[in-house]
Image: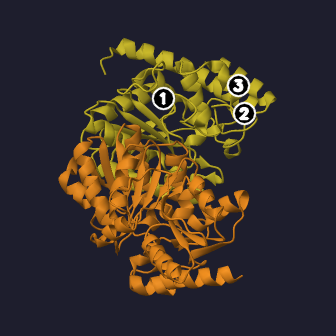
Amino acid sequence: MGHTSTQRERDVAFLKKQAKLVRIEILKMLTLAGSGHTGGSLSAADIVTALYFSKMRHRPDNPGWRERDRFVLSKGHAAPLLYAVLAMSGYFDISMLKTLRRLGSPLQGHPCSRVLPGVEISTGSLGQGLSVSNGMAIGLKMDNLSSRIYCLLGDGETQEGQVWEAAMTAAHYKLDNLCAIVDINGLQIDGPVSQVKAIEPVASKWRAFGWNVIEIDGHNMEGILDALDRAETVKGKPSVILAYTIKGKGVSFFEGKVEYHGVAPTQKELGKALKELEANG
Amino acid sequence: MGKTQSAAVKREAIATRDAYGEALLELGKKRQDIVVLDADLSGSTKTGKFAKAFPDRFYNIGIAEQDMICTAAGLALAGKLPFASTFAVFETGRAWEQVRQTICYSNLNVKLVATHGGVTVGEDGASHQATEDIALMRVLPNMTVIVPADAHETRQVINAIADYYGPVYVRLGRSKVPAVMPAEYEFKIGKAYTFHKGRATNIVAIGIMVPIALEASKILSQEGIDTGVINMSTVKPLDTETLLNVAKTCKLMVTAEEHSIIGGLGGAVSEFLSENHPTPLRRIGLKNAFGCSGTPEELLKLYGLTADNIVRTIKEALKQ
């Protein structure tokens, strides 16, 4: 919106660079922590980078700014991704990323809003973020604020029944200030989503629940920005972006590997991964 | 004290849920930030009154308690003061983990006011009778748990929790209850009300068990057993000062609640006393059992939630 094509091109180039830096920070902090969720942090890195460094109106120096757009990480296990973009945005010093999962650190294994500025709501137990986003969307509408709510879910997470309760609520209350994004990386801890418990057909499910559905390649930065802009223009119903992604995206030996859902890279893997990321960007 | 008590008894019997409906309506007139959520039970929880007066601030989430709890959380994050109501068994049981993860862990300003606590729900049976809700809520960090005894106290509780920041669980009942609290009584979170301090024994009661405890106390005192009654309406944080004060000067402590004897008021009082002032204790309540269908009166009798059973229990305990 309001961009000339050349500006958009420059935005995309900048965001691609940022996404690479975000991935590097994710890998570094996970390796230091020795545990955590690598695959799902990398799969959503492009989307969340686009939100924090382009789309969302927010003020890192004033996390409570009333008119801000809000991001809810419903798939709370992608905490390293959230911590990376928050630190890089300036919510807290980037050196704090080293404390991930350590005793006394505000960077808890899963995000905790009581201890870390910029985290809108504590998550980690799946299926609750969309309902929270609905409540925010209703409350902000009541106050005639134009703020938008972005809620990131995992594809496996949509096996939680509460997600569909929330999907009904958002459509019923016509929450067009809400945009859900499903990171469809196709894998969950126990295996491929299609084998553990199939969620297909995804798009027609959301449509049947009364949502505006946009399907994109979740690693195409231009496509992500277009989808976020398009979602904003649809009135009278909530929008969901179904982002098809690759789990572990950016590091060849993590990509599409179910084993890296909840495992941190080793020092050796980190070295290799960083080299790869540098070479590719 | 005797005078105010008799004055209180003369007042009309009202269900605490009805008092809630009225208090919420009044609060809605005063405060624009109050929003109310229900899960298809607004007729029974009495939030329907607020809904009718303020349709723009009422959200029916349908039969989806987990969604309701988290939607309330989102409203709190957007600067509103949400009251979320349904039956106690669903509010605390069905949505327990939502209350834990999203409300208590984040310490959000959400008021959970549930109705249909205990067996006096009656004919609907065990599926609709919450007899574990106090235990479920009491175990959660940051949570405050309140069980008012009558309509007068309920109105005060609703106003008090609106002025308090943090998650609160309020348990209300379906059936009419007599007025027991004196007209000049002022509810304060965490402060128990002592009707009378007994030299022989003291009954610590909540909710509908307060008038029943008062009846038992009357019978026992006539027989020369000086029996005190304390309304411990805030179960968490427990008024340990009052508890210690009465425990130190009597032979026997008794708890009375329309709830399991495990984990609720009986649990809280025994935890505190056993560590701080070991005192012989008897717990009146459901003994590791579910409720069942019947009239409220029949069920109270069946589960020993009567003045007669309290009297019998105290006499037997004092003999030992």
Q: Quadrant of the N terminus of chain B?
A: bottom left
Quadrant assignment, res B310? bottom right
Of badges 1 and 3, nearer the viewer stands 3
| Residue in view at x 68 percent, y 43 percent | A262
Q: Is residue A271 left or right of residue B244?
A: right
Category of crowding for the residue at label 3, using alpha-carbon neighbours closer than 10 angstroms: few (below 14), some (14–19), many (at least 20): some
Residue at the far right: name it.
A268
Q: Whole-Å distance between the Cαs marked 1 and 3?
A: 29 Å
- Camera-nearest residue between A184 and B144: B144
| Figure check: B150 above or below B287 | above
* Residue under pointer 1: A220
Mark 3 residue element: helix
**Earlier residue among tags 1 and 3:** 3
- The residue that label 2 is drawn on is A102
Give the residue furthest to the left: B53
Residue B70 drawn above or below residue B176: above
Q: Assign the C terminus of chain B to one quadrant of the image.
A: bottom right
Q: Is the C-beta separation of discs 1 and 3 under 8 Å?
A: no
Res A251 quadrant in image: top right
> Badges 2 and 1: C-beta atoms under 8 Å apart?
no
Q: Colour in which chain B is shown?
A: orange
Disc 3: which residue:
A98
- Give the side of residue A153 with respect to residue B13, left or right: right
Tag 2: amino acid: Arg
Q: Quick check: can you spot residue A247?
A: no
Q: Nearer the viewer, residue B317 or A66?
A: B317
Identify the chain of the residue marked 1, using the numbered disc in the image. A
